[in-house]
Image: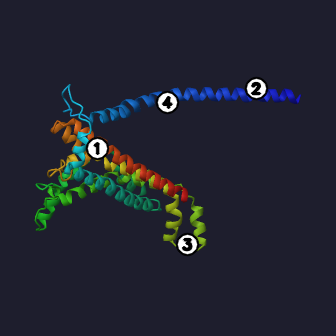
Amino acid sequence: MSELATKTEHAITKKNQNLKQKKQSSLWWMYLPSFAVVFLFIVYPFFNGVQLSFTNWNGFSQEYDFVGMDQYKRLFTDPTTWLVAKNTLLYGIGSTVLQNVIGLLYALLLNQSIKMKTITRTVIYLPVIISPLIMGYIWYFFFAFQGGALNDALQYFGFEKINSLGNPEINTWIIVFVNTYQYVGIAMIIYLAGLQSISKDFYEASQIDGASALQQFKNITLPLLMPSITINMVLNIIGGLKLFDVIIALTGGGPGNASQSMSTFMYDLYFKRQDAGYAATQGVFMAFIILILSLSALVYFKRKEIEA
């Protein structure tokens, strides 16, 4: 009887394994459309861009020549490359820091029992749903030298107008501010979700031990928020480093190349200068910077999650 039971159990186990394998096989077939979309719109264009970075293609002609590493030599000797790379890092890192600090402060505030919490959260998140180009033009009419709301207010109170968008020392920070203003709502929502997932038992136990609010934040809130911090950091770095629309709307990359990012510089190279080969080289360089910084942030904050 026991031998029969063993054989029956073995047959059932084998049948379950076959069903599981068939289920997994069918799931892989369901993944194929996603893989096809990723390959068609991300992988293939990227490698095609890498190929074009070794050519002198003008973006329109059917013919172009392979020039080897000439475009990369040009990239590293071009002073504009380092100017736009510096601006790109400013937009990426500056926006990331501000969005995370302000987003966390908003989340901590809205996690409390305060009046009009839902309305406040909606108002903070609302800019996210607006097109970045439209958001850039909204703020352009605030900072514009002629007819801008800021200069109108300054003149009303007897002060001189300032050309904030035409000043290279100011306009890059204005771009960081506008990008932060628009996307801080995403950081806030992610942090708010993280805060609401932390059990109140931790705080009650710490209060019994006499922990202050600052100690609770340092030893409970921050460690348990590390997954949210990781998500926000990586998303904000990637978004800030590829900033394009806001720059086009506010300054157009000017004056000169003073506020260009690598994205807007590539746009100028391709469409205005008809230098598509060099634009592709800049694109490969930008992809490399984004990959290094985003992966570094991911690895660093993932380790912090494990330590916490």
34 or 265: nearer the eye?
265
Q: Mark 3 points at which residue?
A: 211
Of labels 3 and 4, the one closer to you? 4
- Label 3: which secondary element: loop
Within 10 Å of disc 1 (Cα), the crowding (few <14, some 14-19, many 20+) is few
Report the residue at 73% width, 30% height from top: 13
Q: Distance between the residues labelled 4 and 2?
A: 31 Å
Q: Quadrant of residue 45?
A: top left
246 or 156: nearer the eye?
246
Asked if the residue under mark 4 is in contact with the one under mark 1, i.e. CB atoms within 8 Å, the reply is no
Q: Distance between the residues labelled 3 and 1?
A: 45 Å
Report the residue at 50% width, 58% height from top: 304
Of labels 1 and 4, the one closer to you? 4
Q: Name the residue under label 4.
A: 31
Q: The N terminus is located in which quarter?
A: top right
- Label 4: which secondary element: helix
Report the residue at 41% width, 55% height from top: 188
Residue extending farthest to the right is: 1
Q: In this view, does 256 lie to the left or right of 181?
A: left
Q: Can residue 189 be seen in this view?
A: no
Q: Which amino acid does label 2 sit on?
A: Ala
Q: Distance between the residues labelled 3 and 4?
A: 50 Å
Q: Name the residue under label 2.
A: 11
Of labels 2 and 1, the one closer to you? 2
Label located before the other in sequence (3 or 1): 1
Q: What residue type is labelled 4?
A: Tyr
Label located before the other in sequence (1 or 4): 4
136 or 127: nearer the eye?
136
Label located before the other in sequence (2 or 3): 2
